Amino acid sequence: MTRLWWTQIKAVIRLELRKTFFAKRGLWIYVVAALPVLLFIAYAVAMSHEQNRTATIAHDSERHLAYQDLLAIKSGMTKQEVTAILGKPPVVFHWTERRPTGPDSTQEVLHEDYHYSDGQNDLYLGFVDGKVQSINIHEAYNLGDDAVMFAGVFQFFFLRLAIFFGCLGIFMNLFRGEVLDRSLHFYFLAPIRREVLMAGKFLAGLLATCTIFITSELLQTVAFLWHFNPQTRDLYLYHNHGLEHAVVYVGVTFLACVGYGAFFLVAGMLFRNPIIPAAAVLIWEGINPFLPALLKQFSVIYYLKSLCPVEIPVSPGTPGLFALLISNADPVSPPLAILGILVVALLALFVSSVQVRRMEINYTTE
Amino acid sequence: MAVYRRNYRPYSGTQTPEWSRFLVLFRYSRRNLFQSKVQTGFFVLCFLWPIVCLVMIYLAHRASFLAKLGVPSELISIDNMFFFRFMSVQGVLAFLMTAFAGPGLISPDLANGALPLYFCRPLSRAEYVLGKSSVLGILLSQITWIPGVILFAIQVSFAGPKWAWNNLWIAGSLVVASLIWIAILSLLAMALSAWVKWRIVAGALLLAVMFFGAGFAQAIDAVMRTDSGHFLDLGYLMWAVWIGLFKVDAENSISAFPASIALLVYCSICLLLLMRKVRAYEVVR
Amino acid sequence: MSDRIIFEDVSKFYGEILGVNRVNLSIPPGITSLVGPNGSGKTTLMNLMTGLVKPSRGRIEVLGHPTNDPENLFKFVGYSTQFDAFPKGLTGFQFIYAYLCLSGMPLQDAERTAWQAIERVNMVDAASRKVAAYSKGMRQRIRLAQALAHNPKVLVLDEPLNGLDPLARSEMIALFRASAAEGCYVIISSHILHEVDVISDQVILLSNGYVVAEGQIQSVRSEIQEHPTQILIRCDRPRELAAKLFESEYTIEASIHNDGRGLLLKTRDADRFYLAMNQLALNGVQIESIAPADDDVLSVYEYLIGNEEVVR
């Protein structure tokens, strides 16, 4: 019997994957998964360009500069004082401002912008009438900051929005979509147990979402690391837990697909308009940090956040509400978090299996 | 002689004016709107905030009452900021109302093959879109600029003609801000409704465009260290336009003019999608 | 194990709307037609029989199997529904093949079986095109193919001839007859009463969710006492024959046919009337043919269901 069920599950998966992977109407899920990859590719290209530019400026400088040299410039210094410390500027912009001094009179004010670099950090100086008025230091982007940025994009965009909407689209289609298409009865008229059918559809959806979003996650990681030099990359991957983080992100992506997928599968069965529970869950997940400890546990994102390898630090001056949103005030241990997601998913699948047995074909009421 | 020639006579009575034909669509679409109890309940809920604002206007002119409550009268100030806050809340409610009502406008016609039935009559595609969008237009007007203008009128009745003269531009801003938001929401809802055959998916897409767009905009800003990501956030763009219209002093990274251009581009895209999809035939390959 | 399809005091309510009420049926092998006006409960009965809907009350068994066991039921039941919708993006072949695979059939066997089913309905040329691009008749044929593919013992067909051209209709009718001859149970719902007359072994008449009559059409007709049997007699001297027939107590009404060479009679006792006719024939009236004029599904339908509509 188990062998028959497995054969049937494979048949369901094949049929569903054809509808998900190769259908035009599934295109938007690829777009949703590809957008963060494109973003990180754009970032890598921009950073490479930036690094090349900075290196060129440092190369064109009159003398080799150190970070301390850049820090030595103070407001009010003259051009001569600045060039004495840093040398002739490799990049200079001049522009004139016509400042009104009276009803019919204006005064010409000469502005000059100097750009220096030590090869990694950039210094921008703004001169007005020969004196330093503005000082701007762009520090080099380091892997630590970028890892936090990656973690932020992963937690707040990829998990909460990309995977959420992707799972909504795929899993909601599995039953509710068939009802709207008036094609569910073909499954119910086949000699297959309804629970087996449900399992097959869930696994098909899981396979599709995991393939799409794990691929996206891996490509994001590659794009994110691309612009760093090989030594920095190797140091991060093999000595600073980078590879471990990448594997954990893949695992969290998988668990997100399991959790959200099971929820949307049962929502598609129980509700004629699953968008209402989806919107409710979106808002619930959004306000999760503000909920009491007991209510927090009824959330997929609560467990997923605890599993993320990089914690996002709250910078000083962040408003209280945002700080609460960013921080993970009540983290759960990884084994409990994984168990939590699996329990939520199994519960949803149990309800689905009960509901699928009760389902009747009555398209006219849809 | 063929049988039909004996009895058939074409209609020769009076006809309704051509320009009013689109109102037929409006009448029938609107009838379906309030069949849902949830939708009707939400519509009623949309008037809660205007009522709160009404109470605030009343209290602002009852300094003695406020003094009895121990509340300083300067706390409630009826100015451009007041109406900006009114518009912000009603704008969110208008979006949610569109998410309820918008998806059911064109999707069912597509799914049930009704478009050929419409276009084999003397009804153009533009009239069809106008008829459908008028449903949303009137519905959203009822919860945005109409109560806003009523509140303004009530404030004028309390504050007097001098206040009215100095602040008449706020009423204009209310109307313009509402109409821009209604136009965007209507076009977006209808374009998405025309693009997918399922009402439910159209609703999901509308949510996705707003929430996903806002999230992706934040992601772009965080990754690329820029503010240009906000051009993908429709809600933010509208907010920037409102800041300009209400002359409010608020921090925003995009000014009103570029935000308006971006919104115009989005409207054009929605119109293009509508033109592409609202047709009398469908080709299946 | 029972050899019948059994409905035992079955009722189905959709909220407050009646689908079927207190249906008791025992359907034997052969071609059984469900006949009734729109909304009478034909599709509901078929959906109940195949487990797509559950009865509000009562019990249903199909050859001894309950309808809530799809894993076993659909090994020998095939259902062609009225829904003109298909899974998106599939060709005709993929549609049949995929659902054969769902039954656990090995891939090669499923492929071979799918092509056999497609050949049976003459859809080989169109099998590699998407179903969405099919005409109405082609969609109907591919639906039939899907129901027939696994050679079911019980074939439930909801308006199977809908949209088919005359040639396709006769081919399908021949197919149904062949299946019935092999001992299959073929349950058809149809509005085309003259075809129901020709192909059915028994009929079930439904009206407003109730079974109004069931059985062979002739025996059903004979039980409708309130409507005298109508008999059409083709002869050379209908007036003379009519005068003679009025002498017997069995004739209630007689009318001359429009062409003047026939007589339409109504009688309360058809058997005795036929005996009396033998006497008359021996008395020199040239009778070309005698046949019942209302011994068909259409007449029974009008008497049992049509009258109800008139009363309403």
Image (cartoon, rainbow, N blue to C red):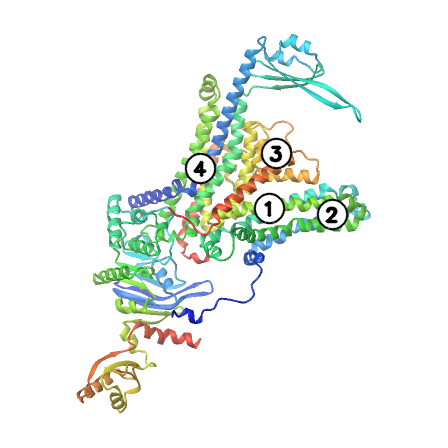
Q: Nearer the viewer, residue B99 or A54?
A: A54
| Residue C184 pos. (x, y %) | 24, 61
Disc number placed over residue A30 in the picture, else none: 4
> Farthest residue toward the front?
B1
The residue labelled by disc 1 is B183
The residue labelled by disc 3 is A322
| Residue B141 pos. (x, y %) | 63, 50
Q: Residue at x 64, y 39 (%)?
A: B241
Q: Nearer the viewer, mark 2 or mark 4?
A: 4
Q: Nearer the viewer, residue B85 or A262?
A: B85
The residue labelled by disc 2 is B56
SS class of the residue under badge 2? helix
SS class of the residue under badge 3? helix
- Tell which circle, 2 or 1, labels the residue nearer the N-terminal end: 2
Q: Chain of mark 2?
A: B
Q: Nearer the viewer, mark 2 or mark 1?
A: 1
Q: CA distance from mark 2 to mark 4?
A: 49 Å
Q: Quadrant of residue C44?
A: bottom left
Q: Image quadrant for the N terminus of chain B? A: bottom left
Question: Which amino acid, mark 4?
Answer: Tyr
Question: Which amino acid, mark 3?
Answer: Phe
Q: CA distance from mark 4 to mark 1?
A: 29 Å
Residue C270 vs C203, above or below: the answer is below
Q: CA distance from mark 2 to mark 1?
A: 29 Å
| Residue A98 pos. (x, y %) | 72, 22
Q: Chain of mark 3?
A: A
**Label 2 crowd (10 A; few <14 / some 14-19 / many >=20):** some
Residues at marks 2 and 1, common chain?
A: yes
**Label 4 crowd (10 A; few <14 / some 14-19 / many >=20):** some
Residue A80 vs B181, above or below: the answer is above
Residues at marks 2 and 4, common chain?
A: no
